[in-house]
Image (tube, rainbow, N blue to C red):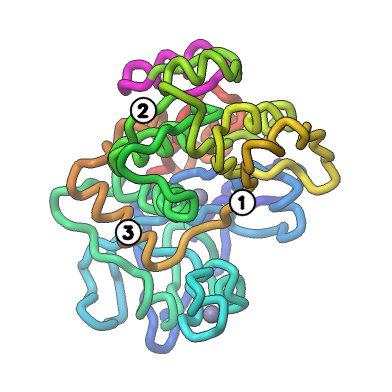
């Protein structure tokens, strides 16, 4: 079968790879769509695993296998990893840090014609997609789940004042999720005029630079939580200035290892600002994301700026890297 193979140093090609087999107690999925994620574009992260099949946001139809309610013909979202649900980390709610989370995986990856899902993932985090939700919208479950996990950690809720630094597809999801959670005010910070325009069209003011006075003006005070959806070290440093007393700055997109970020910690000392990071999403988060998309709380399709076929996967990655795109979706027939 065909799959998008990452060869290292940013090079992706459409290759023939071995057909995955139905795992014992698992599922075999005919993949319909799979989004390209920011982490698929982080060469330093992917290079350690190359060669590998990219993609971890697949939606498709069950071809073979039966697990619980899930039968052949069922349209499903497949999560990429699952925790054990039993260790100390799982019991304390840190499911994505569970050693089992990184060990479990789909074979060979989401950007492939077919994917094998091992029993542990099939039992815990393969979700039936309701009729009203398109494949494309369901592919947003994974990135939205990551956002919802982060917002839960940051305590976003009714009355929150939220700043989002970086208004690409993840930044837009942060803004939409915060609004859906009842945030009182949401503002974006984004240097690219085109992305600011998209944020504004979605109903959120967006400023060209992280000016604390202007952010406070837009929010009615400094932010309770700042979500940093860019790995730019200067943007990360500037986010600290946007958080108000007791506020949280949450790092969503890591800079490459060995990239120092100069932080003026004196500036946050008197405001007791916490710096927090969030990694991936667990079973509770994928269900929350599916619920929010199904209820129309977030328009998943609106985030997708480009749809390309698997045969165009090299162009899909070029677009995703270019910064011209929001979410790039690969359609697989
Ligand atoms: Zn992702
Ligand atoms: Zn665990």
Q: Could you say which is closer to the camera, residue 104 or residue 213?
A: 213
The residue at 68%/44% (across/down) is 254
Ligand 2 image position (quadrant) = bottom right
User: Can you name the residue that lies furthest to the front here?
Assistant: 270
Q: Position of residue 119 (x, y in %)?
A: 42, 83
Residue under label 1, please give it.
Answer: 277
The residue at 53%/36% (across/down) is 226
Q: Earlier in the sequence, mark 1 or mark 2?
A: 2
Q: Position of residue 189 (x, y in %)?
A: 53, 22
Q: Position of residue 63 (x, y in %)?
A: 30, 71
Q: Could you say which is closer to the camera, residue 212 or residue 11?
A: 212
> Local crowd at mark 1 within 10 Å, few (<14), some, or many (≥20)?
some
Element class at badge 3? strand
Quick check: can you spot residue 186? Answer: yes
The residue at 51%/70% (across/down) is 95
User: Can you name the residue that lies furthest to the left here?
Assistant: 131
Q: Decide if ligand 1 comes within 8 Å of the CB at mark 1.
A: no
Residue under label 2, please give it.
Answer: 185
The residue at 41%/80% (across/down) is 22
Which image quadrant is residue 53 in? bottom right
Element class at badge 2? strand
Give the magenta range: 188-204
Quick check: can you spot residue 19? Answer: no
Which image quadrant is residue 296 in? top left
Residue under label 3, please give it.
Answer: 60
Mark 1 vs mark 3, CA separation in Å? 31 Å
Q: Earlier in the sequence, mark 1 or mark 3?
A: 3
Q: Earlier in the sequence, mark 3 or mark 2?
A: 3
Q: Is residue 49 left or right of residue 18?
A: right
């Amino acid at each position: 079968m065909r799959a998008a193979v990452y060869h290292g140093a940013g090079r992706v090609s459409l290759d023939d790879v071995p057909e995955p087999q139905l795992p014992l107690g698992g599922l075999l999925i005919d993949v319909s769509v799979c989004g390209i994620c920011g982490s698929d574009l982080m060469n330093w992260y992917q290079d350690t695993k190359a060669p590998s099949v990219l993609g971890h946001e697949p939606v498709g139809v069950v071809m073979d296998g039966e697990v619980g309610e899930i039968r052949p013909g069922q349209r499903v979202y497949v999560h990429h990893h699952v925790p054990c649900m039993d260790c100390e980390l799982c019991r304390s709610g840190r499911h994505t840090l569970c050693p089992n989370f990184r060990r479990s995986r789909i074979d060979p990856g989401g950007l492939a014609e077919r994917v094998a899902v091992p029993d542990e993932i099939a039992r815990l985090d393969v979700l039936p997609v309701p009729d009203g939700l398109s494949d494309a919208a369901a592919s947003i479950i994974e990135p939205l789940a990551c956002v919802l996990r982060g917002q839960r950690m940051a305590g976003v809720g009714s009355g929150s004042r939220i700043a989002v630094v970086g208004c690409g597809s993840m930044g837009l999801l942060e803004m939409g999720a915060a609004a859906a959670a009842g945030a009182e005010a949401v503002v974006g910070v984004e240097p690219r005029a085109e992305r600011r325009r998209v944020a504004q069209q979605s109903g959120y003011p967006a400023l060209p630079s992280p000016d604390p006075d202007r952010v406070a003006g837009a929010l009615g005070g400094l932010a309770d939580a700042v979500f940093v959806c860019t790995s730019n070290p200067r943007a990360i440093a500037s986010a600290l200035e946007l958080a108000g007393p007791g506020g949280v700055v949450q790092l969503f997109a890591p800079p490459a290892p060995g990239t120092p970020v100069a932080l003026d910690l004196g500036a946050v000392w008197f405001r007791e600002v916490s710096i927090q990071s969030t990694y991936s999403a667990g079973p509770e988060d994928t269900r929350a994301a599916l619920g929010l998309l199904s209820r129309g709380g977030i328009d998943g399709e609106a985030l997708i700026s480009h749809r390309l076929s698997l045969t165009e996967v090299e162009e899909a990655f070029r677009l995703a890297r270019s910064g011209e795109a929001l979410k790039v979706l690969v359609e697989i027939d």
